[in-house]
Every structure is written in structure tokens, then in C-alpha cells.
Amino acid sequence: MRKLKVFLRRIKSMSFKRMFELIGLISKEHKRPSIIIFFDMIWCSLRYGMGYLDYKVFGFASIHGKNRKTFMTMNHNLAYVRSLNDKEAYHYLDNKIEFNKKFSEYLGRDWIDLSETDINGLQEFCKGKHAVFAKQAQTFGGQGIDKIEITPDINYTELYQRLTENKQFLIEDCIIQHDEMNKLCPSSINTIRMVTVATNNIPHFMYALVRMGAGDKAVDNISSGGMYTSVNEKGMLTKPAFCDKTGIYYDRHPKTNTEFNGFVIPYFDEAVEMCKSAAMVLPNLRYIGWDVAITPNGPVLVEGNNFPSYDMVQNYRHLDGKTGILPKFEKVINNNV
């Protein structure tokens, strides 16, 4: 009965146009009749609590039987977030300024809060810099972020007024990206999403993805047209990168022509250890997705997320087999909470 209620709620909010567009794409991709895809989607929604977008990403048109039970769905993810993360502590990750204060030792860059300084403070911070990033404290998906070029004729009074009116109170140094990471896409900071789960005061590293810009924006967010691929336990890319905007899997970056297969992320082991260390800072937030940048001197934290994604890591073109990540999470969480 509960699954039926969830299904009916989703029916009310879903876009049928988008669903049937995806059914057509899935039918061509997996060479199966659209009508079979449609009814299988309905079954998976009732049986597994899965939406049609996850059906496509997980490649369920070609995955059957017991293997389907190995995939983490939105319902699983929500249950883990609710059981492992205390809402009262969300603000440490939701607010970029609070995050910077709490995780200052992992940032590797200077920053100021305009609500705690004046025009002179802004000017002093920008002295000797070519550019800074201005950010709203509580936005997501790369929104509310601007790169400010520091020129000799810049008017700090006007700049301060504009930034404060836009509520862009967080001003940060630019992150200098490692040359190897620039080979993926030099116009964006290509962050690694690393997910940790802490149980019995022990941090566990769960998985990693690398996200990169498509070449025309200074952000790597998938919602802004970027792309992503999986990272194995050795910090190596072995799968094509997927771009939601184009729906295409790329063996090479479309702008830089860098081949993904065999690319090794520098300082990967150090990044894993940094995230495991950061995972112990807030004992009441035990399931966190960390965005990590790689600099010439090592990894640094960009931000943290109290509601990590579950879908991208289970993209069927990135899986070595036809199994999802649920068993790994169950082993870590159910046996150790």
C-alpha cells in the first residue's frame, strides 16, 4: 500500500512528455520495443520505488532479476540521509560561509565574509590577486557564483555595493588547479565527488566521481552542462564521460580531446584520506558528499553536501558489472550503525 501511495504521488508530479521522450531513447539504445519499456518502467516504480530517470541512468532495460535489487534508489538514499544525518547540523554544509569556518584546515585558500568587513577589507583582500570568486552563501548547482577579475582601475566602492546587494558575501581566492586536471578541462575546476559514511566513529570511503566542465563555462556542475565519469579505487578513469545536456557518452573530452580511459587523478589517495578525516569533524553528519579540487600542492575541499547523489555512480555505462552500490552501503551501514 505504501509503495502504491508513493507511485501515485509521483504520477501527479511527473512529466509524461519527458517520460515518453526517454522511453523512445531507451528503446533505441537497448533495442527493445517502447511498449515493453513503458510497462517495465511502471513495474519498477511499483516494485523498487524507481523513477523513469533512474530507469534510464541505471540501464534497467538490460538489467533483470536479482541484479535489480542491488541498485540504490531515491527511497534508499533518503532513508540513509534521514538515519545518518541530523537536520540540526545541515547548516554547516548548506551555508558556504559556515562550511569554510568549520572545515578551514582543508580549504587551502583564503576567504572573507563581506558581512564582517567593509570596503577597505575587500580591497585589502583583493590586493595582488588577478581574480576572486564571489559566492552567495546558500545556493547550489553553481548558481550565485561569479568570477571577479581584479583590474588596476576597479572601483571597490561599486564592487562592494554590487556584491552585498547580490548577497554574494563569500569572497574566495581562486583555486589553482593541478596541470593534470587542466587536461580534462582548463576552463573549470574539475571536482571529484567523494562520498563517505561514518559508522562507530570510523569513516568509510564509498565511491568517487569526477565532474568537469564541457569547455564553455567556469563550473563543472552537471546541471550547467558539465559531464561526469566514475573513478576507480586507484584514482583512474576507465569509462566514458556522460553529459546530461547532450545525452552523449564521450571517450574523449569534446573540447580538449583528452582521452578519459587511463587518465589518473593526481593526489587521489591523499584526497581519500582528507575526506575521511573531514568526515569526523561533525559526528552528527555521517553521510556526506565532498567536492574536492586537486591543486599543485594536493587536494582541497570545495564544499560538502548532506544529501549525496546516488544516481550518477550507478550509471550503467560506468559499472563493471550489472550490479549497483546498494550491497556496499548495506554492508557498511547495517552492520555498523
Image: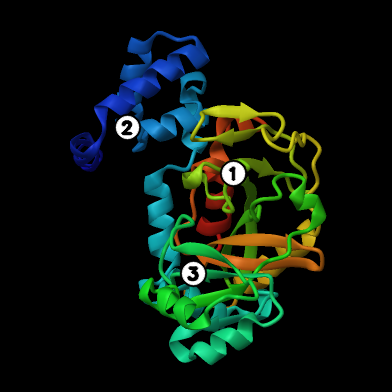
Locate residue 329 relative to residue 1 in the image: left or right. Answer: right
Amino acid at the residue labelled 2: Ser
Figure quadrant of residue 82: bottom left
Write down the residue under mark 1: 216
| Residue 30 pos. (x, y %) | 51, 15
Secondary element at tag 1: loop
Q: How crowded is mark 1: few (under 14 residues within 10 Å), some or many (20 or more)?
A: few
Write down the residue under mark 2: 45
Which residue occupies 49% across, 57% down? 142
Q: How crowded is mark 3: few (under 14 residues within 10 Å), some or many (20 or more)?
A: many
Residue found at the very far front of the displayed protein: 153
Camera-side residue of 161 and 39: 161
Tag nearer the camera, 3 or 2: 3
Which residue occupies 33% across, 11% down? 35
Amino acid at the residue labelled 3: Lys
Write down the residue under mark 3: 135
